[in-house]
């Protein structure tokens, strides 16, 4: 994995090899409860060359990049799967590239999931998938970036962000100052 600034980068070409793949932004709720916003947001999805900066032409969107600014959602070739569809939202959208909208996971109940999946894209050995994401999830919820072959068969999880566990510091007695 490579991270740079606010954008996350996954070396998909090195991890998967050259070929045709689709990628799923998956958010899954646990069985325990609801806490925080319980959502995921994704934006500025692009395939980069091995230099990590040059945008490659792809089916992701205009100029090889998907920023979810078009009124039609999901964008051409993209799919929403699972219990509640992803949607385009202006609420707390990523605006670093002057955008007004981001893809937003739909509301989920316990034990539910939703996924926003890209169209098939051809990648070379050095290509990098870059995206911006935000999650507000509880301890056991998960946000994955999944890889699928060109037929839609799951291959592997490329990226995992789990909820943050609460840490508690116990107070020790006697307390001392200085």
Image (tube, rainbow, N blue to C red):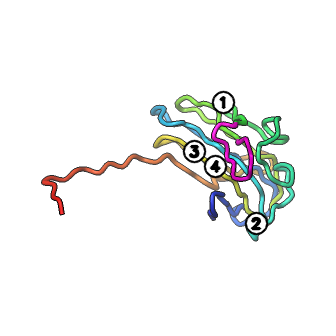
Mark 2 surroundings within 10 Å by alpha-carbon count, few (fewer than 14), some (14 through 19), many (20 or more): few
The label shown at residue 53 is: 2
Q: Magenta residues, as a range? A: 90-102
The label shown at residue 135 is: 3
Give the residue drawn at x 78%, y 53%: 21
Q: Quadrant of the C terminus?
A: bottom left
**In the rendered image of this protein, does residue 59 appear above or below residue 89?**
below
| Label 4 sits on residue | 133
* x and y, in percent, of residue 93 in the image: 67, 42
* x and y, in percent, of residue 128 in the image: 73, 62
Upstream in sequence: badge 3 or badge 2? 2
Give the residue drawn at x 63%, y 57%: 6
Structural distance between the alpha carbons of marks 3 and 2: 25 Å
Question: Residue at the left extreme?
Answer: 174
Callout 4 touching callout 3 (CB < 8 Å): yes
Please tell me which residue lies in front, 88 or 15.
88
Mark 3 surroundings within 10 Å by alpha-carbon count, few (fewer than 14), some (14 through 19), many (20 or more): many
Upstream in sequence: badge 2 or badge 4? 2
* x and y, in percent, of residue 25 in the image: 67, 45
| Label 1 sits on residue | 84
């Amino acid at each position: 994995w490579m991270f740079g600034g606010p954008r996350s980068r996954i070396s998909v070409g090195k991890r998967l090899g050259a070929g045709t793949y689709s990628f799923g932004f998956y958010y899954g709720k646990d069985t325990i409860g609801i806490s925080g916003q319980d959502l995921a947001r994704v934006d500025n999805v692009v395939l980069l060359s091995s230099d990590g900066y040059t945008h490659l032409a792809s089916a992701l969107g205009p100029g090889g990049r998907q920023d979810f600014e078009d009124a039609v959602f999901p964008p051409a070739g993209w799919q929403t799967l699972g219990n509640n569809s992803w949607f385009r939202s202006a609420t707390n959208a990523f605006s670093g590239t002057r955008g007004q909208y981001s893809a937003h996971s739909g509301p989920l109940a316990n034990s539910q999931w939703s996924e926003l999946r890209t169209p098939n894209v051809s990648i070379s050995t050095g290509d990098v998938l870059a995206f911006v994401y935000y999650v507000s999830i509880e301890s056991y919820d998960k946000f994955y970036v999944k890889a699928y072959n060109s037929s839609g068969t799951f291959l592997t999880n490329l990226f995992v962000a789990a909820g943050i566990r609460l840490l508690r510091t116990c107070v020790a007695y006697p307390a001392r100052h200085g």
